[in-house]
């Protein structure tokens, strides 16, 4: 309620400028695509043309040009453009969205199991998309966040075996987790409609996630989140 929906196109600066007319602050959340820096650059140019300086950019944990995570490298490139253009910015860097498990819905429904390349007892920092969105919006509308970067994560770490136990309770049947091979993981999430590029990138992220989290926690401060849990 009270939200006006405007149509834009991240590849069309003129369309974005029309959509941004009368806007004072932007929260930018982009899909995981290989040309993310180019498309976000179009958004930044449209913002500049519209005279908008306040930007909250949803980025990626561990954003760094040397990261093994392709998403982190792409977001780092966009972050550097934001800095160069001088926006009043805040970066919000999520670790792992709980809703990513929907990529495994088909395997869970038909086989009662799911996999990633990670060990069953590997602790993972997850965050609910609703919490991530609420915090990004709060940051955009409150003072004290300009020039800062936050890691968006739930302070409670979950293992994959615990995730399977939670699914079992919620679904009323046994759901099992196993550490799958690279190809097993690709097959699982591509069956859900994920592109091969995104699937390969995700497989690499899961394989590196333990090291990845250690890196991001040294680089940035944690951002506290709301009440949503894995349940």
Image (cartoon, rainbow, N blue to C red):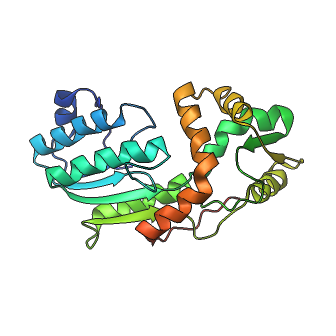
Residue 214 seen:
yes
Q: Name which residue lies at 29% across and 69% down.
A: 145
Q: Position of residue 90 (x, y in %)?
A: 30, 60
36 up-or-down from 3: above or below:
above
Side of 21 relative to 132 (left or right): left
Residue 143, position as x, y percentages in the image: 25, 71
Q: Position of residue 223 (x, y in %)?
A: 45, 69
Which image quadrant for residue 144? Answer: bottom left
User: In the rendered picture of this protein, how many numbered marks are placed on residues?
Assistant: 0
Kindly indicate the quadrant of the structure image that contains residue 30. Answer: top left
**Left or right placement of residue 114 versus residue 191 in this view:** right
Q: Residue at horizontal 58%, vertical 70%?
A: 155
Quick one: 45 or 65, which is closer to the camera? 65
Above or below: residue 181 compared with residue 59: above
> What residue is shown at x 51% (from left), y 68% (from top)?
225
Residue positioned 30% across, 45% down in the render: 78
- Who is closer to the viewer here, 192 or 38? 38
Whether residue 82 sits left or right of residue 225 in the image: it is: left
Between 72 and 152, the one nearer to me in the picture: 72
Q: Is residue 99 above or below residue 103?
A: below
Pick the quarter of the image with the C terminus.
Answer: bottom right
Q: Position of residue 16 (x, y in %)?
A: 22, 34
| Residue at the extreme front of the image, as rendered | 66
Residue 29 in view, yes or no: no
């Amino acid at each position: 309620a009270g939200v006006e929906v405007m149509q834009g196109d991240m590849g069309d600066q003129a369309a974005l400028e029309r959509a941004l007319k009368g806007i004072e602050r932007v929260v930018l959340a982009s899909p995981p695509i290989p040309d993310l820096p180019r498309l976000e650059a179009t958004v930044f140019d449209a913002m500049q043309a519209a005279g908008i300086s306040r930007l909250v950019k949803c980025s990626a944990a561990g954003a760094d040009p040397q990261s093994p995570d392709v998403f982190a490298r792409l977001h780092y490139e966009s972050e550097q453009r934001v800095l160069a253009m001088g926006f009043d910015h805040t970066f919000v860097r999520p670790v792992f969205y709980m809703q990513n498990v929907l990529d495994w819905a088909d395997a869970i429904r038909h086989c009662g199991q799911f996999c990633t390349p990670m060990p069953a007892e590997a602790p993972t920092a997850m965050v609910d998309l609703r919490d991530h969105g609420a915090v990004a919006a709060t940051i955009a509308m409150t003072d004290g966040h300009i020039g800062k970067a936050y890691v968006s994560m739930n302070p409670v770490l979950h293992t994959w075996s615990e995730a399977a136990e939670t699914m079992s309770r919620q679904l009323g049947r046994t759901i099992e987790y196993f550490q799958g091979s690279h190809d097993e993981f690709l097959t699982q999430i591509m069956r859900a409609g994920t592109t091969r590029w995104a699937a390969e990138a995700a497989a690499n992220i899961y394989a590196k996630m333990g090291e990845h989290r250690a890196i991001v926690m040294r680089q940035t401060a944690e951002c506290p989140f709301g009440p949503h849990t894995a349940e």
